[in-house]
Image (spheres, coloured by chain):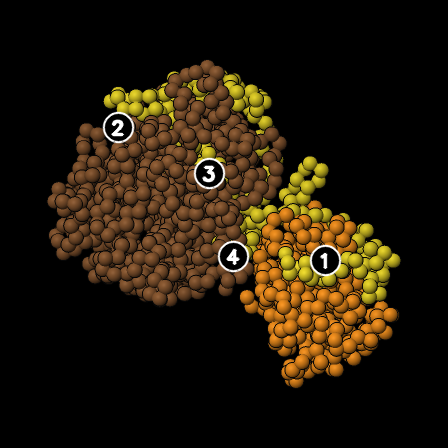
Chain colours: A yellow, B orange, C brown
Amino acid sequence: MEDTTRREFMGIGAAATGALGVSALGFDLGPAHTVRQRLRIEGATVSRSVCPYCAVGCSLLAYTRRTGRKTELLQIEGDPDSPVNEGTLCPKGASSLELAVSRRRVPSPLYRAPGATEFKRVSWEFTLDKLARNIKASRDRTLVTKDADGNTVNRCEGIAFAGGAAFSSEEGYLATKVMRGLGVVHLEQQARV
Amino acid sequence: MTAVHPADWATARRRAETLRTRHPHAADVLTLYLALLDVWEESAAAARDTRPDSLAAWSARHVLPRVVAATAYGPEPLAARAAGVGEPALRAWLAGDETLGPVERYVARAATRGPLTAVDAGAACAADPAPRGGRRCPDCGGPPQLSYRTDAGDRLVSGRRMLQCARCAASWACAAHTCAGCGETSRRTVYAEHREGTAVGRRDADGSEFGHLRVEACTGCSRYLVDVDLGRDPRAVPEADELTALPLGLYAGEQGFTKLTPNVMGL
Amino acid sequence: MVSLAATFGRGAMTNHWRDIRHADVILVNGANPAEAHPVGFRWLMRAKTDRGAKIIHADPRFTRTSAVADTHLRIRTGSDVAYFGGLINYVLGNDLHHREYVEFATNAGLVVKDSYSFDEGLFNGFDEATGAYDPTAWAYETDADGNARVDIDHPRSVLNLLRAHYSRYTPEMVERITGIPREQFLEVARLVGTTGRPDKVMTIVYAVGLTHHTTGVQLIRSGAILQLLLGNMGRPGGGMNAERGHANIQGNTDHAISWDILPGYLKVPAPGQRNLDDYVAQSASKKLRPNAVNFFGENYRRFMVSLLKTWYGDTATADNEFAFDLLPKPAANSSWISIFDQALRGRMEGLILSGMTATSIGPDSNQVLQALSKLKWLCVMDPFRTTSSEFWNAPGMNPADVRTEVFMLPATHWIEKDGSFTNSGRWAQWKEQVLPPEGESRHDHWILADLFLRVRALYEAQGGRFPDPVRRLTMDYRDPRRPELDEIAREINGRDLGTGERLTTFADLADDGTTTAGDWIYTGHYPPEGNLTKRRDGVQDPEKNDPTGMGFYPNWAWSWPVNRRVLYNRASADPSGRPWDPDRPGIVWDPATRTWTGDVPDYPPTAAPGPDAPLPFIMTGEGTGRIFSNGVADGPFPEHYEPVESPVDNPLHPGQSTTPAVYRYDERAGRPNRFGTVADYPYIATSYRLTEHEHYVTQNVEQLVRLQPEAFVEVPAELAREKGIETGDRVRVSSKRGKLEVRAVVTGRLGPLMIDGRKVYQIGIPIHWGFVGINTGQHWLANALTPFVGDASSRTPEFKAFLVNLEKM
């Protein structure tokens, strides 16, 4: 920003901490260096999110730490700037952090064959390939192009989709679009239930 | 936008004394700060009574000698060099001049800090062309010295994010997610002392040395400033506590960040 | 959604959370915001503490909301039409309605056709054979140009019919139906009546306690009519405020994950509509007054064509009706219960559930389990295992007998992807991706895009039934298998195909195929200058960011439509453009600039007040709010009907106790009856959430499971004494459909009530437990009890009023 570059001089603080361990005004920086060596300091990235529970729409600030390939959630707090929640979280929203880092997540796609007594771990490729074949087969079997009155209806009666209360809006839109694209008419989400 | 003057000198003094015991690494800085606090308190009162026309001239005559005297509590060479600084440096500081050397700047800041809290800071700094408001002081146009969070009194409520002026010490609210230097609203990193586990809401200072302090850094402009969280330590006085954050500042420097505005001690 | 759209033209919370602090009186019905929406509830409390607002909580239970309310009315679950109807009768009988507002902003003065009748619980237009009304039978007298006749003093004016209709809802009748003692009711009625004054405002806050009924739509409509009579719609501090229960129900309703609509509340096309002309003629509202704006109706075609251009791209041309034929046209209601009804009939092959668990949701979970086991395949997309992904292993099921193929797909959490959530108050707020996807989990939209493209590839390779819609759907994303939500947001916003620029307002959408908009009500949220849902000018600087001081914060995020914060805000000002209450202005006409100032006007922005000015409600054909409406399936005025399972006959018309238009799925399908009677199941039950849990997903959160570890039911103390039940005892609660065997919590919170001279007990059933989660021992599904029936219009299930028996074990 222009006004800060104009005032570049304001930034000489770090430069002033001379290599000799004495600041420009003559303060001994040795002790601070010693403390700094002893401290375990780490960086966290601040991101903005919205609470996933009820529809009040509380804004959150989330702090994450990246170590190697792993990203850890350190803290969630209310965003003090939001006109909706003004920095406040309820106990449930506060616990959303635990939901986010739960160890109970499903680790990989699972498949249960007809009549099987347990799931088995499968690959995404297997899952999506098989599901796509199921969808096509069900669509081909249950697509009605003309109804009994001769009206063009082009609807797939044998596939239903339900979900999306925790989708981002844009995901929900894509879900609607591709389901209508397949001819699905049984389309539902949590609004009704 | 309403500026707040937290000129409770006695609170600042008590806090600085506590911090001096707790943080030996900052003892020198806090000793000088305590000496300056006396100067600021008295000069603020005098300025309030006098209502000087020219703050620079008045401060040069009435406050500067006392600053030089107080500086005897600071590093050896500084006091001697401070004696050589005069009114032009004060005038330049109030006008936002960018070319002051570190000693001139120290003296100019120390000599005007007290009176500026007692007079119309906007008028006193009228010569400074910097914009008012936004990321600069709404009163005098000075740059932010530090950031702090107010104490909302509830662990599940995050307090407002405030900035405090490096020149007149006024405070003003600023968006919590915005870089005080360049206004960037993404790519922000905060550096703080490591803590185990995860936290929800505002966390207590939990006895760690710097639990309520962190460095707010911007990868956009490579600047940082120190943030003091009063929610974690309601007894903190941002200006005093900021002086103890030097180890965090050294770390930020190693990461390639430059401080947005050095404090009165040039750190 | 249905009832508000039928009354005002849009199906959404009319005001927003922060706005509630402007209210003088707050009626809370069918909701427990102190526990279910705690942070939103702060704004109700602000109204109370800052301006002395009175909170009236009408609820079967005494909850934490009741605890801070000024009055708690213990109301029988599902009887709110009688309560609101009684208030309507009191207001009209005592001439407390806001007369000038009613004439200006409602259809009270329109004259209804003389074919209108209401007799012993039955309106005109009912077809015994189909068991349904023909809503077009509820119409106005019109002249040759199709304009409705206006004469408020006519015996068949809407106002006079309304008066006659609710004259039966005396305080005595209210007491007989709802159980609210008449003196207490009258005290509330007197308070409510004061808000008909221009300088007073009342808001109604409600949630699924009103919608989850066979009469849910009419329960809400009765409140909406009261608000129109009192002149409280469109005003800061007023409105009908539906509290959505999940983070993004509003956004995904707007984008039409719903059988009956397309994005932006365009109706889904119906069989028999051969082209766009047919579609628009049957779907769009007709202009009924010369100066009605009828904005939606007049622009219906533009919005639909722009949607078709978005979805079908170059395939959509003027010559082929913009590919109208490619859109599926459902034969009949295809909502939630219908999915399982179709499965039970053997007509549903596959079901994809994303973040919703049918087994727990029900209704009638045992029947839903049977429905799931009749599917060929079930796909569950969720971060956690659910009672649906595990349904084949549910207590009482034999996995070997269940032939359904089950796919459990690990999906990402909200925090692992970006995108926007639209809150109850229609504020679309962008969130950033905070964490990368955990393990192998994938974004739902990537899964769906990938699946769709694989299906497309199969059609390309193998051919198949009518592949055109699958082949032609646009998937113009940088990586079509992995679309960015930012790309989709731009698609939703739409653009001018000539210039390629994104549009700033839906006013620029065209019906000639030169514009796109994936959802017209979101056009303008992502103009060329950027994504406005990311804006963050909030309370850090109220003077700058809230220039009116009314809490609109126009540069915080973005709200539909066109960043308007209070819907129908033209009605916040009198006919001359001055606010009814100068201290709480919504919009104000400024004669100097000849514009409306304040909030974004829900009105032509430069239309001057005057006798020929456009009418105030721009979304309806009448140009006003609709007291009388043909937008619902079970009557133009709300009428009290008993739940399908009720301990009493309807005191108003025992011969027509339940709504005649209710659809009884089992009966229609020839399955055995699953409704119980008061002889076997003497107690009313109602279900609800606890503050510590969010439906079923929180069974995976240790902290919350520790706080509320075990299923229980709440039993009224007096009934518990009769049965010798003490807190902690195990009890069996059973309906005709299923049972729970759980601990009892004996409480004074629930009653009893005197209903039509009979002592009636209500039993409370928290819904959160199942056979999946941290405490798997708590396998009882609350919705095993609930009936397989829904609202006459929306088919929203009746979760909130049904009959059970209670036994000590």
Task: Look at discs 4 and 1 and give the one toward the viewer.
Answer: 1
- Residue C571 at what x, y percent from top left? 31, 57
Viewer-closest of C396 and A147: A147
Task: Look at discs 3 and 4 and give the one toward the viewer.
Answer: 3
Label drawn at residue C272: 2
Labels 3 and 4 within one chain? yes
Count of numbered circles on the image: 4
Q: Quadrant of the C terminus of chain B?
A: bottom right
> Where is mark 4, residue-wise?
C538
Mark 3, other Cα within 10 Å: few <14 / some 14–19 / many ≥20: many
- Residue C539 at what x, y percent from top left? 52, 59
Labels 4 and 1 within one chain? no
The amino acid at mark 2 is: Gly
The amino acid at mark 3 is: Glu
Q: Quadrant of the N terminus of chain B?
A: bottom right
Mark 1, other Cα within 10 Å: few <14 / some 14–19 / many ≥20: many
Viewer-closest of C56 and C74: C56
Give SS at disc 4.
loop
C383 on left or right of C272? right
Viewer-closest of C71 and A85: A85
- Chain letter for the residue marked with disc 1 in the picture: B
- Chain letter for the residue marked with disc 4 in the picture: C
Give SS at disc 1.
strand
The amino acid at mark 1 is: Lys
- Chain letter for the residue marked with disc 3 in the picture: C
Which is more N-terminal, label 3 or label 2?
A: 2
Is B251 placed above or below C195 here? above
> Where is mark 1, residue-wise?
B259
Quarter of the rendering containing residue C52: bottom left
Is A162 placed above or below B148 here? above
